[in-house]
Image (cartoon, rainbow, N blue to C red):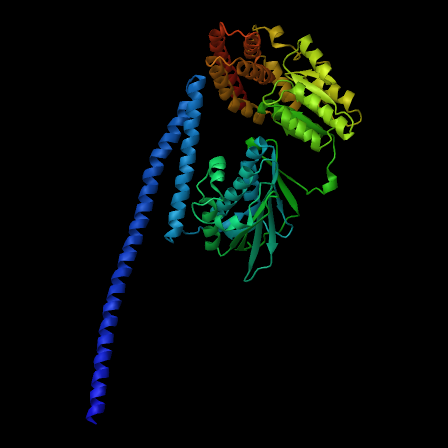
């Protein structure tokens, strides 16, 4: 009996010791928990404080830089100030990404759930990224399935953030082709609908053994991507965590050389009475910079019609002008940024007509035309019809164009009546109309070489008025020109300082053509004189001409800004 009692005593002692250890462990865990809560609160307070402290001076930097850009600066100062502004905005984006990542890691990210219009969100996205796609000649569009409702309950800000990242990556990594955003509806539970959203691009694709790196923070597929495209590697990681926070999934499928498709699903409640619209494609209109978008019915593959025209032109303003004119007339248009690209595109597709700028970097229009004709002979195809585009109206240049096989000749700025006659002559029966009945017949007043215009008329407002009459809304074109003008002036001044005759001639030639499109008669004349100096291997007196060019560029920019303010 005493032995059993002794055993019981020992067991009680063991239990008491265990209970004491448990109390100590609970006390320790409670202290750790309180310390963790205190650390989380400190981290939360730190994030809130650092967010405010960093954003405040950054907003000052950005705001003051924007104000500085509105003051009178010379070309070099304006270029440097623009670079400061771009760098500050990039830094603010990085700060926002780091703060978002820190909040998610600390489990402090909260969703702001409210009713939102999905289709309006996507239309806004297409407007925002349309210009970026146009600059790279990449088609950006979205397809919305018929079953998708219009209004949902969810955090539209975070959904927009995810889509901005995925579509932005698609455009960044795609050099040729398209970026498509597709939205489908899948059966859900509990009154919710599961959206499956895909972003497909025609980029380089990703090797299977690299896919696991994509969603890791601060990671990219390889170091060369960072050097070439930039970025921190945080974007996809943040997207994954936001989607998981919204009870969704994200993934990717990719084949090297054939592009990638990033997809994610989101279970979202449908707002009562939110009827689905018909199947549609939300596409960017040419007036994207005016925050407009067009909704059109989906086209079947064989619905593509209209003459196929290639524009080979290095200046973005001239590209945009001619592209808008021809697309409005009903043509399908492709863009090549230099002669070499034009040769490659003419090898892959048969174009009904090619508009060829004569003076371009990498390969000029004369050499490109010769190569295109040689390609046609080798492949047994008919010779493409090539029309010259140039601001040089001299007989020698006309003869050179004819010798290399160009069938016609248009002088910049493009006269619409001359362009219409060229289309009627070389594409009879195409139905392309760039001149409507309300436009004056005859025309041709714009087809004057800069040297013949003289400097008596500083800015010819009639040229801009006629451009507006033929094209309608030309504000996007004006903005493209104004964006590129400071860089063109800077390139010209820098080339002159370095005594680079060929660069001086090329930039002056380009600026001559683009400024004359908007009636900058005096600026075009000055550029013509600089171009001739460089052609003759002389730069004496160019400093005075450059001062005048800066003055005339500023005057033309002021005139165009006033025109924008009127609309």
At x 24% / y 75%, what residue is drawn? 19
Where residue 268 appears, as percent x and y from the top left, is: 53, 55
* Nearer the observer, 403 or 272: 403
Numbered label tally:
0
**Spot occupied by residue 311 in the image (x, y as percentages of width and height):** 66, 25
Q: Nearer the viewer, residue 529 or 288?
A: 529
Using the rendered view, name the quadrant where residue 30 is placed.
bottom left
The residue at 47%/40% (across/down) is 223
Judged from this view, the residue extending furthest toward the bottom is 1
Quadrant housing the N terminus? bottom left
The quarter of the picture where residue 379 lies is top right
User: Looking at the picture, how far across and down is residue 162, in whole percent?
Assistant: 50, 46
Work out which quarter of the rendered image holds the C terminus and state it: top right
Is 382 on the left or on the right of 258, as rendered? Answer: right
Residue 482 shows in the view:
yes
Residue 189 image position (x, y, % from top left):
56, 62
Horizontal side of 292 relative to 246 (left or right) equals right
Query: Which residue is drawn at the image coordinates 69% and 24% (left, top)?
Result: 371
Q: Is residue 434 left or right of residue 187?
A: right
**Vertical position of residue 332 compared to residue 23: above or below:** above
Residues 47 and 406: in front is: 406
- Most foreground residue, 521 or 337: 337
Task: Judge whether 21 appears above or below 246 on screen.
Answer: below
Considering every residue shown, the one lying at the far front of the view is 378
**Residue 324 seen anywhere in this rendered image of the structure:** no
């Amino acid at each position: 009996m005493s032995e059993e009692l002794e055993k019981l005593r020992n067991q009680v002692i063991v239990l008491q010791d265990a209970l004491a250890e448990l109390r100590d462990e609970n006390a320790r865990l409670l202290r750790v928990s309180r310390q963790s809560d205190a650390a989380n609160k400190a981290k939360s307070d730190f994030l809130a404080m650092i967010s405010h402290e960093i954003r405040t001076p950054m907003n000052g930097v950005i705001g003051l830089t924007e104000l500085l850009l509105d003051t009178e600066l010379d070309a070099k100062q304006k270029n440097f100030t623009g670079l400061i502004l771009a760098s500050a905005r990039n830094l603010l984006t990085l700060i926002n990404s780091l703060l978002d990542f820190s909040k998610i890691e600390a489990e402090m990210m909260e969703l702001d759930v409210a009713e939102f219009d999905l289709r309006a969100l996507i239309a806004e996205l297409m407007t925002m990224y349309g210009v970026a796609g146009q600059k790279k000649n990449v088609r950006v569009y979205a397809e919305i399935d018929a079953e998708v409702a219009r209004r949902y309950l969810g955090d539209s800000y975070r959904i927009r953030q995810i889509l901005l990242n995925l579509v932005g990556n698609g455009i960044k990594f795609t050099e040729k082709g398209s970026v498509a955003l597709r939205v489908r509806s899948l059966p859900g539970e509990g009154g919710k609908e599961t959206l499956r959203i895909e972003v497909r691009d025609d980029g380089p694709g990703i090797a299977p053994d690299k896919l696991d790196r994509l969603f890791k923070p601060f990671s990219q597929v390889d170091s060369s991507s960072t050097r070439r495209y930039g970025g921190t590697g945080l974007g996809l990681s943040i997207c994954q965590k936001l989607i998981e926070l919204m009870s969704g999934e994200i993934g990717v499928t990719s084949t090297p050389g054939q592009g990638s498709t990033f997809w994610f699903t989101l279970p979202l409640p449908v707002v009562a009475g939110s009827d689905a619209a018909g199947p549609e494609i939300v596409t960017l209109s040419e007036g994207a910079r005016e925050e407009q978008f067009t909704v059109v019915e989906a086209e079947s593959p064989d619905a593509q019609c209209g003459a196929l025209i290639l524009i080979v032109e290095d200046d973005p303003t001239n590209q945009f002008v001619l592209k808008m004119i021809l697309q409005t007339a009903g043509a399908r248009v492709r863009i090549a940024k230099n002669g070499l690209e034009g040769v490659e595109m003419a090898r892959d597709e048969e174009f009904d007509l090619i508009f060829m700028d004569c003076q371009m970097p990498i390969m000029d229009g004369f050499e490109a035309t010769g190569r295109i004709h040689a390609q046609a002979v080798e492949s047994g195809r008919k010779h493409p019809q090539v029309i010259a585009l140039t601001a040089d109206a001299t007989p020698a240049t006309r003869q050179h164009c004819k010798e290399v096989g160009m069938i016609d000749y248009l002088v910049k700025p493009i006269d619409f009546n001359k362009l219409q006659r060229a289309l009627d002559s070389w594409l009879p029966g195409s139905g392309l109309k760039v001149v409507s009945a309300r436009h004056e017949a005859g025309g041709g007043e714009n087809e004057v070489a800069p040297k013949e215009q003289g400097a008596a008329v500083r800015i010819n407002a009639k040229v801009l008025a006629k451009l507006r009459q033929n094209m309608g809304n030309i504000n996007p074109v004006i903005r493209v020109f104004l964006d590129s003008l400071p860089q063109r002036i800077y390139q010209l001044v820098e080339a002159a300082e370095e005594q680079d005759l060929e660069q001086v001639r090329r930039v002056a030639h380009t600026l001559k053509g683009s400024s004359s499109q908007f009636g900058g008669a005096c600026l075009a004349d000055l550029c013509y004189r600089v171009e001739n100096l460089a052609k003759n291997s002389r730069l004496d007196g160019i400093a005075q001409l450059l001062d005048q060019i800066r003055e005339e560029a500023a005057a033309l920019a002021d005139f165009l800004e006033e025109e924008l303010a009127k609309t």
